[in-house]
Amino acid sequence: MMMMGSQYEESLRKLDLTVYLFGERVLNVVDHPMIRPSMNAVALTYDLAHLPEYAEIMTATSHLTGRAINRFTHIHQSAEDLVKKSKMGRLLGSLTGCCFQRCVGMDALNALSITTHDIDARLGTDYNRRFLKYLEYVQERDLTCDGAMTDPKGDRSLPPHAQADPDLYLRVVERGKDGIVVRGAKVHQTGAVNSHEIIVMPTVAMREADRDYAVAFALPSDTRGITYIIGRQSCDTRKLEGETFDRGNLSFGGHEALVIFDDVFVPWERVFLCGEYEFAGPLVEQFASYHRQSYACKVGVGDVLIGAAQTAAEYNGIEKAAHIRDKIVEMNHLNETLFCGCIACAAEGHRETSGTWMVDTLLANVHKQNVTRFPYEIARLAQDIAGGLLVTLPSEKDLKAPETGRWLEKYCKGRTDVPTEHRMRILRLIENLTLGAAAVGYLTESMHGAGSPQTQRVMIARGVNMKAKQAAAKRLCGISEE
């Protein structure tokens, strides 16, 4: 059954999460003003799946049951599926102007569908059977899954087993007849408290000494022993100010959380990797490649930012200036180049032995490397076009106050036929996207999400066939090495 957004909201109310924000327990997560905008973004992923005009890219047919499901719970069966995934990401980014939080879970499901099959084929385990049973559970209930990969890591020069504090990478601390007990944490967890399930994976390739850290599993997000600590964001407390356009984005937003696992029990039926350290690296790479393709969402947010920059130029009366037109063209060029990357790695993908369709790893890493750069330039150009008022603009309360409002109406005005409030609203949106809370999802996440820029460069170096390139060059200029 595919849920509606309202049903999704009600399902979250039934969860008993342990969540902290500003040092205090949050008892009502759904309605908290700093968390609610991120929940709204996820709810939209449910509502759009029921609209005929979006059904083709928002839904898919389950390869397990043959029933219609939300694409966020789908295992890709073709290159077309991967292309639709990118189109879905761009659409949702353009409609929310923020992270809509379901991509990581989707990418975790697809990576595990490959890895569990490969482990079983080599070692005779039954991880894939467990996974497929879990997948059907997720699809039937249309659940939102948080994909949890990144560990705190401690001293980055040391492997997991050599850390001074062994819990700086999540690990198995006990194995029993009924399941395992895990301890540790996962950081940078986007949308964690808006999720029904949390899917844990290792974060680095491992050796035999790291066997206890080679673990993958899934649990309900309100499992006993799991604690969520919400992270701070720039301008985040503006969400506490009520219905004010100083938030920039009036309806949507994101959140990140530190997720603590304090001796949490996992039943064996929910365990998909436990000690098979040689498969940790492939799982990380498969997930990372999928998630690097997922950054089509930044193209959608870029669409919003470009639209806002064009609007700000018009409100300022400068839209016809040659340098402004050129900057808008450059912003579009960079944004569409990003879209080319995610479509290319989808179109050049291949079918794994599990039947899952995998993106082209090299092109996925090239695409993500561009994502670490282009949004920053798009944001810089938007700030250039918007002007200095972007960071000196008084508040909405000042606009509405009788003592100051008349002065703001007079001195914050651009074109005479544009209301001053409209100009202030578009500037607040640009601020939100490039400096405020949404900048976490558009800029910092573009840099560090799905792995640091250096990890992509490592994968590019590994994936490029330099011998073939050299052979082509030597052949054309007549160099023979026989």
Image (cartoon, helix red, strand yellow):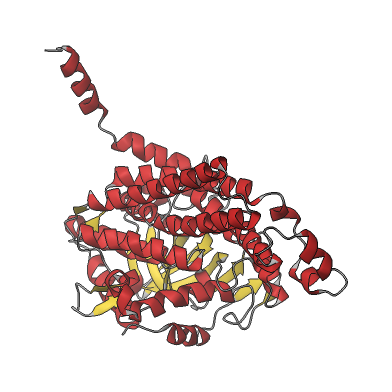
Residue at far front of view: 417
289 displayed left or right of 253: left
Which residue occupies the foreground of this view, 90 or 315? 315
Residue depicted at x 36% and y 47%? 208
Q: Is residue 390 above or below residue 71?
A: above
Where is residue 181, by image quadrant? bottom left
User: Does residue 167 appear in this view?
Assistant: no
206 displayed left or right of 361: right
Residue depicted at x 88% and y 71%? 403
Q: Quadrant of the N terminus?
A: bottom left
Across and down, in percent, residue 157 comes to 52, 39
Q: Is residue 187 above or below residue 282?
A: below
Across and down, in percent, residue 472 comes to 19, 23
Residue depicted at x 77% and y 62%? 394
Which residue occupies the foreground of this view, 138 or 6? 6
Across and down, in percent, residue 125 comes to 22, 63
Across and down, in percent, residue 296 comes to 39, 56
Residue at far left of view: 482
Where is residue 434, by image quadrant? bottom right
How many numbered discs? 0
User: Does residue 363 appear in this view?
Assistant: yes
Which residue occupies the foreground of this view, 106 or 338? 338
Q: Quadrant of the C terminus?
A: top left
Which residue occupies the foreground of this view, 384 or 419? 419
